[in-house]
Image (cartoon, grey):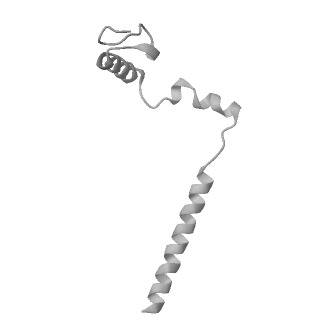
């Protein structure tokens, strides 16, 4: 019975160590010249039509546009 617990703890310990190693090695620093590829429009996850729809919907819902472009102002008429 005690040997089973020791083996189980050893397996758990190994799994935890492997997970920590993967987490540590998955963090990487991106250099400035590599960021150009990340900001490329082709790298966007969402299509532009969906993005435009969401922006329009948010502006309509909030009753103000502001940072997304266009006029600014509150929906109640008070600026």
Farthest-out residue, front:
78
Quarter assignment of residue 29: top right
Location of the N terminus (image quadrant):
bottom left
Determine whether, in the image, residue 32 is placed left or right of residue 10. Answer: right
> Picture quarter containing residue 47?
top left
Name the residue rendered at 58%, 31% in the picture: 38
- In this rendered view, identify the residue nearer to me: 41 or 51: 51
Residue in view at x 38 percent, y 20 percent? 55
Q: Where does residue 43 sit, x and y in percent of width and height? A: 52, 30
Q: Is residue 13 above or below residue 78?
A: below
- How many numbered tags mark residues here? 0
Image quarter of the C terminus? top left
Residue 31: percent from left, percent from top: 69, 36
Which is more toward the observer, 49 or 73? Answer: 73
Q: Residue at x 53, y 24 (%)?
A: 41
Q: Is residue 32 above or below residue 68?
A: below
Q: Residue 28, relative to residue 1: is it above or below?
A: above
Q: Position of residue 54 (x, y in %)?
A: 35, 23
In the image, 62 versus 11, the foreground residue is 62
Q: Residue at x 57, y 58 (%)?
A: 22
Q: Residue 24, image x and y in percent?
A: 61, 56
């Amino acid at each position: 019975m005690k040997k089973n617990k020791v083996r189980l703890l050893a397996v758990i310990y190994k799994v935890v160590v492997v997970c920590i190693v993967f987490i540590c090695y998955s963090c990487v620093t991106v250099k400035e010249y590599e960021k150009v590829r990340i900001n490329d429009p082709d790298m966007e996850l969402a299509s532009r039509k969906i993005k435009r729809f969401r922006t329009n919907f948010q502006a309509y819902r909030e009753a103000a546009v502001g940072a997304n472009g266009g006029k600014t102002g509150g929906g109640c008429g008070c600026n």
